[in-house]
Structures are given as structure tokens and as C-alpha cells.
Image (cartoon, helix red, strand yellow):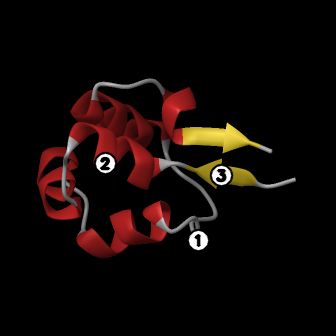
């Protein structure tokens, strides 16, 4: 049972592009893309906090366990 990353869903709800999110959270496009596609093996809490702050959401809105 994998952990699903719903970053693309939250970005669509907030009408935010990957470039805009990258600037707000100070991460490279490639790192955000890896996270967005679900290929990331881990995420730092500071990164998750920055993403949640930028998207005005909770960690559970981005990460889902199935």
C-alpha cells in the first residue's frame, strides 16, 4: 500500500504553477517535479511545511496513504 502524493491536485485547486510554487518554497523545479510525480523516496518536514504554507493546506491534503 503506497503513499500517494497529491501535490498536483492541491496546485490545481490553488491555480498555482510548478514554477510559482518553486519560487515560493525555494526548491528547484526538478525536486518539486520528483515530488509531484510520486517518485520521491522521502520529504523533509521543513519542505512539507513550506509547501503547506505556500498552498495554504495541511500535510494530509498532500499526502495520502492507500
Q: Nearer the viewer, mark 3 or mark 1?
A: 3
Q: Nearer the viewer, residue 16 or 19?
A: 16
- Residue drawn at x 58%, y 71% is 39
x and y, in percent, of residue 21 in the image: 20, 51
Kindly identify which residue carries mark 2. Answer: 12
Dot 3 and dot 1 residues touching (CB under 8 Å): no
Task: Please tell me whether mark 3 or mark 2 is closer to you in this view.
Answer: 2
Closer to us: 4 or 25: 4
Residue that lies at the very extreme toward the bottom in this rendered image: 30
Residue 12: percent from left, percent from top = 31, 48
Tell me if residue 7 comes above or below residue 50 in the rendering: below
Asked which quadrant contains residue 19, the reply is: bottom left
Quadrant of the image for the C terminus? top right
Mark toward the start of the polypeptide (3 vs 1): 3
Q: Is residue 58 left or right of residue 3?
A: left
Q: Nearer the viewer, mark 2 or mark 1?
A: 2
Residue drawn 35% across the image and 32% down it? 52
Crowding near pointer 1: few (<14 within 10 Å), some, many (20+)? few
Q: What percent of the width, then of the height, locates residue 20?
A: 12, 54
Q: Disc 2 or 1, which lies upstream in sequence?
A: 2
Within the image, what quadrant is residue 14 found in? top left
Residue 64: assigned label: none
Q: Which residue is mark 1?
A: 39
Q: CA distance from mark 3 to mark 1?
A: 10 Å
Amino acid at each position: 500500500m503506497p503513499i500517494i502524493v497529491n501535490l498536483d491536485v492541491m496546485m490545481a485547486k490553488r491555480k498555482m504553477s510548478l514554477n510559482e510554487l518553486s519560487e515560493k518554497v525555494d526548491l528547484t523545479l526538478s525536486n518539486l517535479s520528483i515530488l509531484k510525480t510520486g517518485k520521491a523516496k522521502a520529504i523533509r518536514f521543513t519542505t512539507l511545511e513550506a509547501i503547506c504554507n505556500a498552498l495554504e493546506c495541511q500535510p494530509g491534503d498532500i499526502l495520502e496513504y492507500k
